[in-house]
């Protein structure tokens, strides 16, 4: 007598992967816009050109680039021999970092 063999196939991994990408993308977008807003709140303003040049771009769903787009932005951030540094991007990223990490941690907990 042969034993019956039952095989059930149900692969939820593609759906989970799709939802994971969307969820991570949402966390990345929120963090990027928060960094942008915080940088704009603390950047030194003379003409407003530097502040208005700070933008968020999303080359991938899970990747963000938040940056100023002026020739002199780096000199304001890091200073020069003649001008003291007036950081605005690093402090903005450092301020948002813990919330970004927490968002990723909460997502990880939901997936367990």
Image (cartoon, helix red, strand yellow):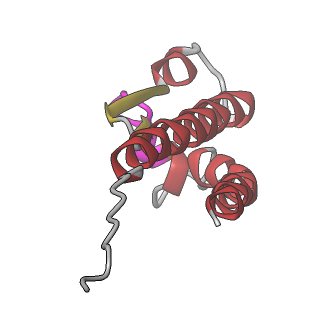
Residue at image position (33%, 46%) is 14
Residue 65 appears in the picture as rendered:
yes
Counting from the top left corner in percent of width and height, residue 22 is at 47, 35
Tally of numbered tags: 0
Range of residues picked out in magenta:
67-75
In this view, 47 is above or below 43: above
Residue 86 visible at all: no
Point 59% across, 32% down: residue: 36
Please indicate whether residue 27 sits to the left or right of residue 73 in the image.
right
Q: Quadrant of the N terminus?
A: bottom left
Question: Residue 64 in the image: x percent, y percent?
Answer: 42, 40
In percent of the image, x 57 and y 22: which residue is there?
A: 51
Q: Is residue 25 above or below residue 103?
A: above
Q: Please state which of residues 81 and 46 is positioned toward the viewer in this rendering.
A: 46
Between 46 and 94, the one lying in front of the other is 94
Between 67 and 25, the one nearer to me in the picture: 25
Task: Reply yes or no: does residue 2 show up in magenta.
Answer: no
Report the side of 25 relative to 90 (left or right). left
Asked if residue 84 is positioned above or below residue 72 in the image, the reply reads below
Image quadrant where one finds the C terminus: bottom right
Q: Is residue 74 magenta?
A: yes
State the residue in front, 56 or 24: 24
Where does residue 4 sit, x and y in percent of width and height? 32, 73
Q: As drawn, which residue projects farthest toward the front?
A: 1
Q: Quadrant of residue 107?
A: bottom right
Give coordinates of residue 15: x percent, y percent: 41, 41
Q: Residue at x 44, y 32 (%)?
A: 68
* Residue reaching furthest to the left: 2
């Amino acid at each position: 007598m042969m034993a019956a063999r039952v095989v059930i196939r149900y692969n939820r991994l593609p759906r989970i992967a799709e939802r994971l990408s969307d969820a991570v993308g949402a966390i990345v977008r929120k963090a990027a816009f928060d960094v942008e807003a915080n940088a704009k709140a603390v950047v030194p303003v003379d003409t407003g050109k530097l502040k208005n040049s700070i933008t968020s771009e999303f080359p991938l769903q899970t990747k963000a680039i938040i940056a100023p787009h002026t020739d002199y932005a780096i000199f304001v951030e890091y200073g020069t021999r003649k001008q003291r540094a007036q950081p605005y991007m690093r402090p903005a990223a450092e301020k948002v970092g813990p919330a970004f990490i927490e968002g990723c941690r909460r997502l990880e907990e939901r997936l367990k």
